[in-house]
Image: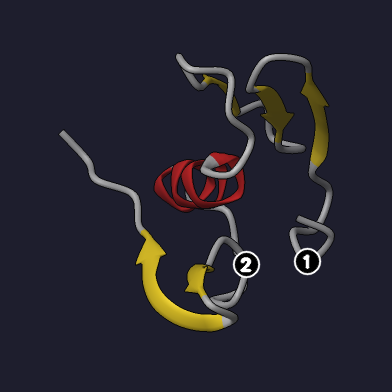
Amino acid sequence: MAGVPGLVAKDGAEGTFAAALPEGSAVAVKVLDGGMRPLPVVVADALRVLGAAVPDDVGRRAVLGGGEPVGEIRPVRG
C-alpha cells in the first residue's frame, strides 16, 4: 500500500487490518478464518471505494498452482 499517498495502515494477528486516509476516512477488515492472503485485495478495493488513488497493480493477487497462475483473488461487493 506504499503507493497510496498519506495512508496510515497496520496489520494485526488473525487476519486483521486497519487503514486511514489523511482526510479521515478509514477501513478495518477482519478475515473470519484468520487468513492473511485476501487482505491486500480486500483493503485495496475498500480504499478505492473510499476514493483513494490506489494504483491498479495494488491488490492484485494471482493464485499459483505448480508455479503457474491458475486463478486470482478478487473482491466481491455485496
Identify the residue under disc 2.
58
Rate crowding at label 1 as few (under 14), some (14 to 19) or many (20 or more) other CA atoms within 10 Å: few
Q: Secondary structure at mark 1?
A: loop
- Point out residue 30 in the picture as x, y percentages from the top left corner: 54, 17
Label 2–label 1 contact, CB within 8 A: yes
In-front residue for pair 77/67? 67
Residue bearing mark 1: 3
Q: Quadrant of residue 20?
A: top right
Q: Give me the residue at 78% from left, 66% from top.
A: 3
**Residue at 68% from the left image edge and 15% from the top image edge:** 14
Tell whether 76 sits left or right of 49. Answer: left
28 and 48: which is toward the camera:
28
Number of numbered labels in the structure image: 2
Q: Amino acid at mark 1?
A: Gly
Q: Which residue is at 63% across, 22% downward?
A: 15
Residue nearest the observer in this picture, 66 or 15: 66
Residue at 50% from the left image edge and 22% from the top image edge:
31
The CA span between labels 2 and 1 is 8 Å
In the visual, does 74 lie left or right of 27? left
Earlier residue among tags 2 and 1: 1
Q: Secondary structure at mark 2?
A: loop
Question: Residue 60 at what x, y percent from top left?
Answer: 52, 68
Amino acid marked by disc 2: Val
Q: Dividing the image into 4 quarters, which one contains the C terminus?
A: top left
| Extreme-bottom residue of the structure | 68
Q: Which residue is at the far left? A: 78
Which sits in the foreground, 16 or 28? 16
